[in-house]
Amino acid sequence: MTAPGQPTPRWVGIARAAVGASVIAILAHAYMIAIPEDGANPFDYFGYFTNLTSLLCGVLLLVIGIRQFASRSIPVWLVYIRAIGVASMLVVALIYNVLVPGTGSAPPWVSVALHLVFPSLIALDWALNPDRPTLPWRRLWIVLPYPATWLVVVLARGVTDGWVPYGFLLPERGMPALLAHVVGLICTLLISGVLVWAASRIRLPTRRRVGRRPRS
Protein backbone atom coordinates (compact mmCIF):
# COMPACT_ATOMS: atom_id res chain seq x y z
CA MET A 1 0.00 0.00 0.00
CA THR A 2 1.40 3.38 -0.98
CA ALA A 3 0.89 6.74 0.70
CA PRO A 4 -1.52 9.13 -0.99
CA GLY A 5 -0.43 12.67 -1.60
CA GLN A 6 0.63 15.07 -4.28
CA PRO A 7 3.44 14.05 -6.65
CA THR A 8 6.89 14.97 -5.38
CA PRO A 9 9.26 16.90 -7.69
CA ARG A 10 12.51 15.07 -8.33
CA TRP A 11 14.51 17.94 -6.84
CA VAL A 12 12.83 17.31 -3.49
CA GLY A 13 14.04 13.71 -3.61
CA ILE A 14 17.55 14.92 -4.44
CA ALA A 15 17.47 17.40 -1.55
CA ARG A 16 16.27 14.76 0.90
CA ALA A 17 18.94 12.29 -0.19
CA ALA A 18 21.61 15.00 0.09
CA VAL A 19 20.54 15.98 3.61
CA GLY A 20 20.38 12.34 4.70
CA ALA A 21 23.83 11.59 3.31
CA SER A 22 25.24 14.74 4.94
CA VAL A 23 23.91 13.76 8.37
CA ILE A 24 25.38 10.28 8.05
CA ALA A 25 28.73 11.83 7.08
CA ILE A 26 28.63 14.20 10.08
CA LEU A 27 27.92 11.29 12.44
CA ALA A 28 30.78 9.29 10.93
CA HIS A 29 33.15 12.25 11.30
CA ALA A 30 32.15 12.85 14.93
CA TYR A 31 32.60 9.15 15.68
CA MET A 32 36.05 9.04 14.13
CA ILE A 33 37.36 12.07 16.01
CA ALA A 34 35.97 10.68 19.29
CA ILE A 35 37.87 7.36 18.97
CA PRO A 36 41.19 8.47 20.50
CA GLU A 37 39.47 9.87 23.60
CA ASP A 38 36.52 7.60 24.28
CA GLY A 39 37.35 4.41 22.42
CA ALA A 40 35.73 2.92 19.34
CA ASN A 41 32.56 1.54 20.88
CA PRO A 42 29.65 2.16 18.49
CA PHE A 43 27.19 0.81 21.06
CA ASP A 44 28.08 3.70 23.38
CA TYR A 45 28.18 6.28 20.58
CA PHE A 46 24.74 5.37 19.30
CA GLY A 47 23.46 4.99 22.85
CA TYR A 48 22.97 8.74 22.72
CA PHE A 49 19.43 9.48 21.57
CA THR A 50 20.66 12.34 19.38
CA ASN A 51 23.13 10.17 17.49
CA LEU A 52 20.82 7.19 17.12
CA THR A 53 17.83 9.26 15.99
CA SER A 54 19.96 11.33 13.61
CA LEU A 55 21.31 8.14 12.05
CA LEU A 56 17.85 6.63 11.63
CA CYS A 57 16.43 9.84 10.14
CA GLY A 58 19.46 10.31 7.89
CA VAL A 59 19.12 6.80 6.48
CA LEU A 60 15.37 7.30 6.14
CA LEU A 61 15.74 10.54 4.18
CA LEU A 62 18.37 8.94 1.97
CA VAL A 63 16.10 5.98 1.15
CA ILE A 64 13.03 8.14 0.56
CA GLY A 65 14.98 10.62 -1.56
CA ILE A 66 16.41 7.89 -3.77
CA ARG A 67 12.99 6.30 -4.23
CA GLN A 68 11.44 9.64 -5.18
CA PHE A 69 14.25 10.48 -7.58
CA ALA A 70 13.61 7.12 -9.24
CA SER A 71 9.87 7.97 -9.38
CA ARG A 72 9.03 5.08 -7.07
CA SER A 73 6.12 5.31 -4.65
CA ILE A 74 6.56 5.59 -0.88
CA PRO A 75 4.79 2.85 1.12
CA VAL A 76 2.58 3.92 4.03
CA TRP A 77 4.72 2.11 6.60
CA LEU A 78 7.71 4.22 5.55
CA VAL A 79 5.67 7.40 6.03
CA TYR A 80 4.86 6.31 9.59
CA ILE A 81 8.54 5.68 10.32
CA ARG A 82 9.27 9.14 8.95
CA ALA A 83 6.63 10.62 11.28
CA ILE A 84 8.23 8.85 14.25
CA GLY A 85 11.61 10.22 13.21
CA VAL A 86 10.31 13.78 12.91
CA ALA A 87 8.67 13.60 16.35
CA SER A 88 11.86 12.20 17.89
CA MET A 89 14.04 14.88 16.27
CA LEU A 90 11.78 17.59 17.69
CA VAL A 91 12.39 16.13 21.15
CA VAL A 92 16.14 16.11 20.48
CA ALA A 93 16.06 19.80 19.51
CA LEU A 94 13.82 20.80 22.41
CA ILE A 95 15.76 19.03 25.16
CA TYR A 96 19.18 20.11 23.94
CA ASN A 97 18.44 23.73 23.07
CA VAL A 98 16.18 24.44 26.04
CA LEU A 99 17.47 22.24 28.87
CA VAL A 100 21.14 21.41 28.21
CA PRO A 101 22.53 23.83 25.59
CA GLY A 102 26.25 23.73 24.96
CA THR A 103 26.89 20.37 26.61
CA GLY A 104 28.67 17.40 25.04
CA SER A 105 32.16 16.77 23.70
CA ALA A 106 31.41 17.10 19.97
CA PRO A 107 32.73 20.11 18.03
CA PRO A 108 30.32 23.07 18.20
CA TRP A 109 29.46 22.87 14.50
CA VAL A 110 28.46 19.21 14.90
CA SER A 111 26.16 20.09 17.81
CA VAL A 112 24.57 22.90 15.81
CA ALA A 113 24.07 20.62 12.80
CA LEU A 114 22.52 17.75 14.77
CA HIS A 115 20.55 19.72 17.37
CA LEU A 116 19.34 22.71 15.38
CA VAL A 117 19.85 22.57 11.61
CA PHE A 118 18.81 18.97 10.97
CA PRO A 119 15.73 19.02 13.25
CA SER A 120 14.62 22.28 11.61
CA LEU A 121 15.06 20.90 8.10
CA ILE A 122 13.26 17.65 8.81
CA ALA A 123 10.37 19.45 10.53
CA LEU A 124 9.98 21.99 7.70
CA ASP A 125 10.15 19.19 5.13
CA TRP A 126 7.31 17.39 6.91
CA ALA A 127 5.16 20.51 7.30
CA LEU A 128 5.64 22.12 3.89
CA ASN A 129 5.83 19.21 1.44
CA PRO A 130 2.34 17.81 0.75
CA ASP A 131 3.53 14.30 -0.17
CA ARG A 132 2.37 12.63 3.06
CA PRO A 133 -1.10 11.46 4.01
CA THR A 134 -3.20 12.74 6.89
CA LEU A 135 -2.25 10.55 9.85
CA PRO A 136 -5.15 9.14 11.91
CA TRP A 137 -5.11 10.10 15.59
CA ARG A 138 -5.81 6.52 16.66
CA ARG A 139 -2.27 5.62 15.56
CA LEU A 140 -0.50 8.33 17.55
CA TRP A 141 0.73 5.60 19.92
CA ILE A 142 3.28 4.41 17.35
CA VAL A 143 5.64 7.22 18.36
CA LEU A 144 6.24 5.42 21.69
CA PRO A 145 7.86 2.00 20.95
CA TYR A 146 11.10 3.43 19.55
CA PRO A 147 12.02 5.74 22.46
CA ALA A 148 10.63 3.22 24.97
CA THR A 149 12.96 0.54 23.59
CA TRP A 150 15.87 2.98 23.76
CA LEU A 151 15.03 3.79 27.38
CA VAL A 152 14.81 0.12 28.38
CA VAL A 153 18.21 -0.65 26.84
CA VAL A 154 19.86 2.42 28.37
CA LEU A 155 18.41 1.82 31.84
CA ALA A 156 19.43 -1.84 31.68
CA ARG A 157 22.98 -0.78 30.89
CA GLY A 158 22.90 1.71 33.75
CA VAL A 159 22.04 -1.08 36.18
CA THR A 160 24.44 -3.67 34.76
CA ASP A 161 27.59 -1.81 33.72
CA GLY A 162 26.93 1.70 35.03
CA TRP A 163 26.95 3.44 31.63
CA VAL A 164 24.20 5.85 30.67
CA PRO A 165 24.38 8.54 27.97
CA TYR A 166 22.82 11.29 30.09
CA GLY A 167 23.33 12.12 33.75
CA PHE A 168 19.63 12.40 34.55
CA LEU A 169 19.27 8.67 33.83
CA LEU A 170 21.82 7.55 36.43
CA PRO A 171 20.27 4.96 38.81
CA GLU A 172 22.02 6.48 41.83
CA ARG A 173 19.93 9.64 41.47
CA GLY A 174 17.08 7.68 43.00
CA MET A 175 13.97 6.03 41.65
CA PRO A 176 11.62 9.06 42.06
CA ALA A 177 13.93 11.32 40.04
CA LEU A 178 14.47 8.62 37.42
CA LEU A 179 10.75 7.99 37.02
CA ALA A 180 10.06 11.72 36.79
CA HIS A 181 12.55 12.09 33.95
CA VAL A 182 11.25 9.03 32.12
CA VAL A 183 7.64 10.22 32.38
CA GLY A 184 8.72 13.69 31.26
CA LEU A 185 10.46 12.26 28.20
CA ILE A 186 7.44 10.17 27.24
CA CYS A 187 5.06 13.11 27.67
CA THR A 188 7.35 15.36 25.63
CA LEU A 189 7.44 12.78 22.87
CA LEU A 190 3.65 12.45 22.85
CA ILE A 191 3.29 16.24 22.57
CA SER A 192 5.80 16.21 19.73
CA GLY A 193 3.81 13.43 18.08
CA VAL A 194 0.65 15.50 18.35
CA LEU A 195 2.41 18.35 16.53
CA VAL A 196 3.59 15.98 13.77
CA TRP A 197 0.13 14.42 13.39
CA ALA A 198 -1.47 17.88 13.30
CA ALA A 199 1.05 19.08 10.70
CA SER A 200 0.07 16.17 8.46
CA ARG A 201 -3.27 17.94 8.06
CA ILE A 202 -1.63 21.04 6.58
CA ARG A 203 -2.34 21.39 2.89
CA LEU A 204 -0.71 24.44 1.38
CA PRO A 205 -2.45 25.98 -1.63
CA THR A 206 -0.94 25.00 -4.96
CA ARG A 207 -0.76 27.11 -8.08
CA ARG A 208 -3.19 26.34 -10.83
CA ARG A 209 -2.26 26.58 -14.45
CA VAL A 210 -4.09 29.26 -16.31
CA GLY A 211 -5.24 27.92 -19.65
CA ARG A 212 -6.63 29.66 -22.65
CA ARG A 213 -10.25 30.60 -22.64
CA PRO A 214 -12.36 28.44 -24.91
CA ARG A 215 -13.46 30.16 -28.07
CA SER A 216 -17.10 31.09 -28.17
Image (cartoon, helix red, strand yellow):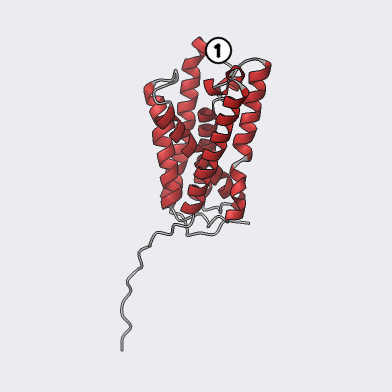
Residue at position x 47%, y 35% in the image:
21
Left or right of 38 on screen, residue 22: left
- Number of labelled discs? 1
Pick out the residue farthest to the top: 36
Name the image quarter holding the C terminus: bottom left
Percent coordinates x, y for residue 4 in the rendering: 54, 59
Percent coordinates x, y for residue 213 in the rendering: 31, 80
Percent coordinates x, y for residue 41 in the rendering: 59, 17
Give the image quarter of residue 47: top right
Name the image quarter holding the N terminus: bottom right
Q: Amino acid at mark 1?
A: Gly
Percent coordinates x, y for residue 104 in the rendering: 45, 20
Residue at position x 61%, y 41% in the image:
144
Residue at position x 46%, y 22% in the image:
29
Left or right of 120 on screen, residue 42: right
Residue 195 drawn above or below residue 182: below
Q: Secondary structure at mark 1?
A: loop
Residue carrying label 1? 39
Between residues 97 and 99, which one lies in front from this camera angle? 99
Pick out the residue farthest to the front: 176
Between residues 104 and 1, which one lies in front from this camera angle? 104
Between residues 22 and 34, which one lies in front from this camera angle? 34
